[in-house]
Image (cartoon, rainbow, N blue to C red):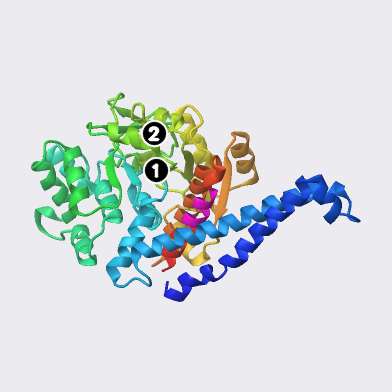
Amino acid sequence: MNFFDWLRPGLKIKRWLAIMILGIVCIVLGAYPVMSSVFLKGIGEQYAPVLMMLGVLFIFAGAKQIRLFLINFLDMGSAGLGYRNPMDKISHHKKILMKGPKVVVIGGGTGLSVLLRGMKKFTSNITAIVTMADDGGGSGKLREDLGMLPPGDIRNCILALANTEPIMERLLQYRFEEGSLRGQSFGNLLIAAMNGISDNFEEAIRKMNDVLAVTGKVLPVTTEDITLYAKLKNGKVIKGESQIPIKVKELNSEIEQVFMKPEHAKPLKESLEAISSADVIVLGPGSLYTSVIPNLLVEDLADAVKKSRAVKVYVANVMTQPGETDGYGVWRHVESILCHTKGQIIDYVFVNHEDISPEVLQKYAEDGAQPVQLTMEDRKRIMEKGMKIIEGPFVEIKKQYIRHDAVKLSEQIMKLALEEKYATDKFRILDYYYLHDKLKKMTKG
């Protein structure tokens, strides 16, 4: 924004003052019978209420524009006209982000970290609550060898929200290709080392948040050693998060229910506090049975979400996941969450409606994945449960991989959160218009 961009609204301020004065005149003419008889002669005094209503609208419109100008003036005064140097611009953006909605995102896996990269462009008030059920890959090996909680999903979320140089991110994501560390990432080892010099895993993650200058905070859903189980429709019970999709395919039987042991694992107090004070709570995107639902099985967490006054959002996956949600549409995803949480926990369901090229779909079809469809029956059932559906072009394809478009999705979630936050306070609705406009411009700047 240069000086003239900032000044342009100020040049119009006289026009809005004139509109406010006109509004006052309309109210006076409509309110006083003596003046009405003089000035409304030939028009009819029955139109006096109409004049008063117009007067109120004129005053409200003028006041809105003048207030926005004053807010802009104060902001630019703190940041420096035209941003005298890059640090001014960064400082100004941080101040705007600190005013953003309080967001709690619950999940795990790639889907959660992708969404967080978009979220941090709109607010710095982010709490990511991450599943601790992972027992495969490098995380599983560290869990087995060192007796620590799995660091993989935590690492990805920290990196998504971290303010690091590209070289640092590449270093933390680097995986060793030879020797006893083959397949292990450097980021996992760093968290393991931090865990070794800390009193507990919770403290280790808090230190990682500080060291990497994380926007918001990343929290494990629990610090207890939990194991995920799945009961299949054929009666078989599968132990271990990494084994569930494998055994589902082998036994050709769908998942009926997932559960964890110990049954009464406790969440972090900090997580419950974040949920209680949130403006919006987002479930997903991510693996339904191994990333999203496991968090909601932790004692008291689902109840905290239900009791929270926040807007509750579920982001439906773009594609089904082989071995977990084969043949699932949007409703079956939602239904599974409702069954495991035993109650209403979702207000809005976000669904992608953008078409995906046949070439990309063919690649996924070879692995058994297909688009998650929203049928008319799905719509009916979701709406019968009192939930609303928000559709949009929320998909992004990079190097033939299908992911959610984190910025577009985050923008719509933030818009919804701001609308709900200020809906009950008519006097602060102008703050919503201003803040939403600022956040939107920053993502494109």
Q: Is residue 404 visible?
A: no
In percent of the image, x 22 and y 42: which residue is there?
150
Mark 2 and mark 1 in contact? Answer it, CB < 8 Å.
Answer: no
The N terminus appears in which quarter of the rendering? bottom left
Magenta stretch: give its range: 429-436
Q: Main secondary structure of the magenta part?
A: helix
Which amino acid type is marked by label 1? Lys
Q: Earlier in the sequence, mark 2 or mark 1?
A: 1
Foreground tag (2 vs 1): 2
Which residue of the protein is positioned furthest toward the right in this rendering?
42
Per the image, the residue denoted by label 1 is 249
Q: Front-most of 293 and 322?
A: 293
Residue 367 is situated, as x and y percent measured from the top left of the image, at: 41, 55
Helix, strand or loop under label 2: helix
> On screen, 244 above or below 44?
above
Whether residue 435 appears in magenta in the rendering, the answer is yes
Residue 312 percent location from the top left of the image: 48, 39
Q: Is residue 297 above or below residue 392?
A: above
Quadrant of the image occupied by residue 252: top left
Q: Secondary structure at mark 1?
A: helix
Q: Residue at x 46, y 49 (%)?
A: 317
Q: Quadrant of residue 61?
A: bottom right
